[in-house]
Image (tube, helix red, strand yellow):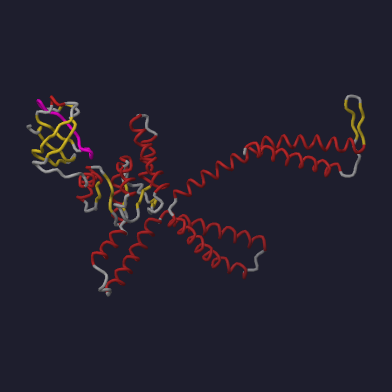
Amino acid sequence: MKKLIRLISFAAGFLAGFQLFAFISGTGTPSFKFFGIEFSGLAAHYTLRTVSGFIFGLIFLIFIPMMVNSFASVTDKWVKNLRRIPLQQIIANIIAIIVSLVLAAMITSPLYKLNLQTWLATLVTVVVYSGVVYIGLLLCNQKFADIDALLRTLLNFARDKRDEGNTTLPRARQRSRQQANIPKILDTSVIIDGRIFDILRTGFLEGPVVIPTFVLEELQFIADSSDSLKRNRGRRGLDILNKIQKELISIEIIISEKNYPEISEVDTKLLKLTQEMKGKIVTNDYNLNKIAELQGVDVLNTNDLTNAVKSIVLPGEEMPVQIIKEGKEHNQGVAYLDDGTMIVVEGGRFLIGKNAHVVVTSVLQTSAGRMVFAKPVAH
């Protein structure tokens, strides 16, 4: 492809230089000497045209591919940025442009009755149209989250009114429909954790997923950290977001531009945004979870979901396990279930590296997860 672009660039430059010399020289007959040999007439004319073609061909060969590469780079960056913008926001911007143009037309229509000079009327019209469209787009993007929340509230209200007289529609279905429209706001920790991608892919979360710009900024700050561990965590979070946008096309992703300059803490901003959007925070941050509960903000904790879907074991149940390491207490061994649940085996120290049948003696549920205590089956 690059070779073809270079070939076309040189050919276009050669033709441009070839024709340009003919246009400049007009009908005159050029003549020149080269190594003592005099050239005149058509020979001199076409020789100079050919030299001019080669010069312009080399100029085009150098600059045209550079311009093409720059244009391709800008276009690629523009397309990537466009992909990050949700469809709802694009539609909202188009509507804002149409409304702004109509408003600008109403403002400028009296100008033609003032008998202004043509150039002045044109200048004022261009300035008004540009200013009104700019302000319309600015307001639309800054207040998009509020507009979206308002439209959803009105839509839900209209649906509720419509379903009030519909006795055939079960109440559970009505509540499910209402829950599906509640925005789910992601915090930084749940994005870095990465499990949110699989949760969204499997459909456990319904409704629009909101990613605030201040969360994106925090991820970018972590990704640029001098600490290698933090840097890797930040980059992982950004990769997860890109993966969600590219692969989960059916999920409604909203990038909220809402920001609160007077608030410095990201968690506080997150709580305020969630309250304004009447949504739910998706997190695995224990402290944020507790603060949200104190403020009456609904929270969806991915750790709770993970614990809820772990396999249930009951005291007295037997199972085969592989004891892989020594426990903290004397003679203890440690094994794991497929879902990551830790099993502490009493007297399992001497079975490390071996497969053994154990019987569950008790199950302990902690904030860190579920822990199972067991002992080897006596044969």
Most foreground residue, 316 or 262 = 316
Q: Position of residue 335 (x, y in %)?
A: 18, 32
Q: Nearer the viewer, residue 137 or 310?
A: 310
Say whether residue 257 is visible: no
**Count of labels in the image:** 0
Q: Which residue is drawn at 57% across and 65% down?
A: 108
Question: Is residue 339 in the magenta section?
Answer: yes
Quadrant of the rendered structure where residue 112 is?
Answer: bottom right
2 above or below 348?
below
Compare residues 1 and 102 and report the one nearer the observer.
Answer: 1
Where on the picture, by quarter, is residue 46? top right
Where's the N terminus, which quadrant?
top right
What residue do we see at 55% from left, 43% from top? 74
Residue 13 in the image: state x and y as whole percent.
73, 40
| Residue 115 can be seen, yes or no | yes
143 drawn magenta: no
Q: 40 left or right of 141?
A: right
- 281 on left or right of 54: left
Q: Position of residue 288 (x, y in %)?
A: 24, 45
* Quadrant that contains the C terminus: top left
Q: Locate residue 23, reporting x and y percent.
A: 83, 44
Q: In this view, does 83 lie to the left or right of 283?
A: right
Q: Give the range drawn in magenta.
A: 329-340
Q: In this view, does 270 lie above or below 121?
A: above
